[in-house]
Structure formats: C-alpha cells, structure tokens
Image (tube, rainbow, N blue to C red):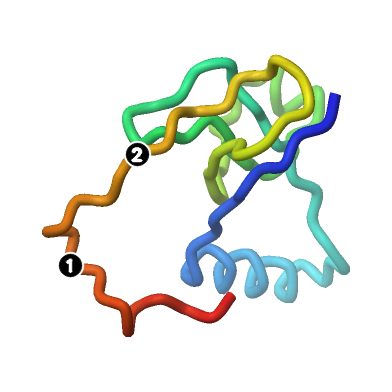
Amino acid sequence: MAQLTDLYLKLDTLKTLVSTLEAKGEKGIALTIAINDEANNYGQNVSATISQSKEEREAKKQKFYVGNGKTFWANDNSFIPPKHERDATSGQSDTDVLPF
C-alpha cells in the first residue's frame, strides 16, 4: 500500500517546537502520524502529534498536535477524502498563492 499525503504545520507551532528542542538540548523530535478512514469537517484525514512513550499513553497524557492534512493519492482502495471546491468568497486571490 502506498499513499501520498499533505501535512500542514503552522509557523507558530514550528517556532514552539524549535524553541522547546533548543531549551531541552534535543537534536530532533519524533512525530506520530495518524491516517484515518474518515475525514473530519474540513476534509482532512491525517493528523500529526508529538510521539508519546508507553508510560505517557498509559497515564493518558494529553497529545500535542502539530499538524493535519489529507491523503490525496493511494495505489489501492485506501480512503481518499473527497475534494472540496474553494468558495469564491474565501478571500484568496491569485497573488496569495505561494510558489511551493
């Protein structure tokens, strides 16, 4: 099974992650990526959290979400959220589109 997914992380979240890693003297961070069989209200089925240890999971420590996204291609019958058309009143103009 192969899939391609988009994952979006906000700049503020990235800054928080970097400053926390620097304060702790860490060299990197482990993420857990969850791909769900159903989409949320925004058409997303992918979420990313900071990985937790077994002890943290058993203690029901709250997850720290870092991003979300959606699957846009799969080579089998995996779930792909339906595409939502952008509303013309969404406020996005051609000049708002980034080159990446």
Residue with the most extreme left position? 89
Q: Residue at x 42, y 37 (%)?
A: 83
- The answer to whether residue 64 is above or below residue 8 is above
Q: Quadrant of residue 53?
A: top right
In the depicted view, which residue is nearer to us: 88 or 39? 88
Q: Residue 71: x and y, percent?
A: 61, 36
Q: Quadrant of residue 70?
A: top right
Image quarter where the C terminus lies is: bottom right
Give the class, few, some or many, for how many residues have Cα within 10 Å of label 2's Cα (few <14, many ≥20). few
In the depicted view, which residue is nearer to us: 67 or 89? 89
Which residue matches tag 1?
91
Which residue matches tag 2?
84
In the depicted view, which residue is nearer to us: 4 or 46? 4
* Count of numbered circles in the view: 2
Q: Earlier in the sequence, mark 1 or mark 2?
A: 2
- The answer to whether residue 89 is above or below residue 81 is below
Kind of residue sitting beneath label 1: Gly
As measured in the structure, the alpha-carbon distance from the residue carrying label 1 to the one carrying label 2 is 16 Å
Judge from the rendering whether residue 7 lies leftward or rightward of residue 82; answer left or right: right
Q: Residue 14: x and y, percent?
A: 58, 68
- Looking at the rendered structure, the secondary structure element under dot 2 is loop
Judge from the rendering whether residue 69 lies leftward or rightward of residue 21; answer left or right: left
Give the class, few, some or many, for how many residues have Cα within 10 Å of label 1's Cα (few <14, many ≥20). few
- Looking at the rendered structure, the secondary structure element under dot 1 is loop
